[in-house]
Image (spheres, helix red, strand yellow):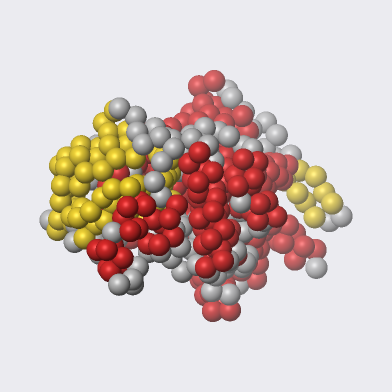
Amino acid sequence: MDTFLQVTAYGLLQGGLLALVAVGFSLVWGIMNIVNLSHGAFVILGAYIAWEVQGWFGLDPFLGMFVSAIVLFCVGYVIQRYLINLIVNGPVFITLLLTFGINMALIQGMNLVFTADFRSIQTSYGSNSFEIGNIRIPLVRLLAFLLAIVITFALVAFVKRTRTGISIMATGMDRGAARLMGIRARHVYALTFAISAALAGMAGTMIATIETFDPSKAGKFTLMAFVVAVLGGLGNMYGALVGGLLIGLVEAWAGQYLSGTWVNGIAFLVLILVLIFRPNGLVGKAFYAARVEI
Amino acid sequence: MLEVKKLCTGYGRIQVLWDIDFAVGENEIVALVGPNGSGKTTLLRAITGMIPVKSGSVDFLGESIKGQSIEEIVSRGIAHVPEGRRLFPGLTVRENLILGAWRTKETSVDHVVDLFPRLGERLNQIAGSMSGGEQQMCAIARGLMSKPNLIVIDELSLGLAPVVVDEIIQALPSIAESGTSILMVDQDVDAALTIATNAYVLEAGHCVLSGKASDLLADPRVQESYLGVG
């Protein structure tokens, strides 16, 4: 029983991070209908930036993640504004091709700059943990989990409560009508993508305090973001949270009771089951159900 | 206020409008009438930049707006209520209205609720869940939120119950008096010409008739083609 609870706790803690990885991916998909295959590369890039910042200035990763967020916000904005916007109305195959290319460029770029060696961000408190009953909770994982949850809720509050956030939702629902309001759709798209990249960067930094990373891990995070986003319901941010926690749990249980190689298989099995029984995802229906184009 | 001269436009290679001349003045209600496919919607789209103008000029408040983006034209003070209303279906009525005031950052909805009191009761309702008439009121109110100099309304009464159409039509003169001129397209020619100051008749992409709305209402050609009289 103790093993089960321990594994469950780890799964939940990991799930919070997966949710943070996926929430931006889901936002971009829901608003712009872009499946961003370079999302995982943003996660890894965020990890490298925080790693470098720690190396140069000794900045704690939980502060360094804000540097990652700012850098990735800018990178994301520029990529969307000057690259993806050119083909944002194209067929999904074209957007897939472009983000796939961006992904390759980023990964190879990181290989060149940072080498393919495994890295991790060490902290003085990295091995601290505390116990609840017989369950051991590592401090860093708990901190990362709590931050991931807070950031996800902050994003939801931003999108639903602020003028800018509402303009993002409106542009996602009907781009043509949004432009008729005077909303600059190209800027809104770039902003949405920038926010998504910034969140990926923060998630990447926190992941780097827990496990090792290298450029080739990018694909794994894109895949996880995809599974979690579809599981939760596209564009649905609470859905990404629920989906992330579920996949975290499933992965932890599968890793413990089956074998490590089954982890991805089981994750996709859960995805397929959810899609059979709840085609719109776990949480309600996708908010952008009524998309129209000009 | 709005002056269009020799305007030609179309979709891709297919030309839809030829040499259209017309003008909308201060506090005026101008109606565009004509059969389906005559180019009324296309003309409205060309004015607000939704489709490019091929030749001719479009001046608004003394400056050319030809070739500008939708966002630029809208921020100069033209609101466009598009065909099919195009509300943001998943947002509340209040959120829709607030987005209507995107360029002026106005957050008070009082002045449009005064105009359409029904919206006042529905501010927190999801826009897509309202009846067609209420959605049209919301769409017009959204257009008026930024207190534009000109509001362009496409297919005002399409698919709406006559009672609601009356309610909306009744509100138009007070909108025009309060400083927002109206350029409208409506299939209900009788109603449109009754409240309009001036009107233009389009046929197959050409402006075939224009003048004071009251004169057109009495014109035998209009009566025969659109009013089923004579």
Q: Residue furthest left?
A: B13
Residue at the image point whose x is 57% and y is 58% from the top:
B167
Residue A58 in percent (x, y) is at 57, 23
Residue B124 in percent (x, y) is at 68, 53
Residue A72 in percent (x, y) is at 46, 36
The quadrant in which the C terminus of chain A is found is bottom left
The quadrant in which the N terminus of chain A is found is bottom right
Residue sitting nearer the eye, A219 or A200: A200
Residue at the image point whose x is 19% and y is 61% from the top:
B204
Horizontal relation, residue A159 to residue A213: left or right: right
Residue sitting nearer the eye, B33 or B126: B33
Residue sitting nearer the eye, B207 or A217: B207
* B179 vs A292: above or below: above
Residue A162 in percent (x, y) is at 61, 40
Q: Residue furthest top?
A: A57
Q: Residue furthest right?
A: A133
Can the viewer see residue B15 in this picture? yes
Residue at the image point whose x is 53% and y is 61% from the top:
B166
Residue sitting nearer the eye, A189 or B168: B168
Report which quarter residue A187 is drawn in: top left
Can the viewer see residue A240 in this picture? no
Residue at the image point whose x is 35% and y is 68% from the top:
B227
Q: How many marks?
A: 0
Horizontal relation, residue A200 to residue B184: left or right: right
* A291 vs B63: above or below: below
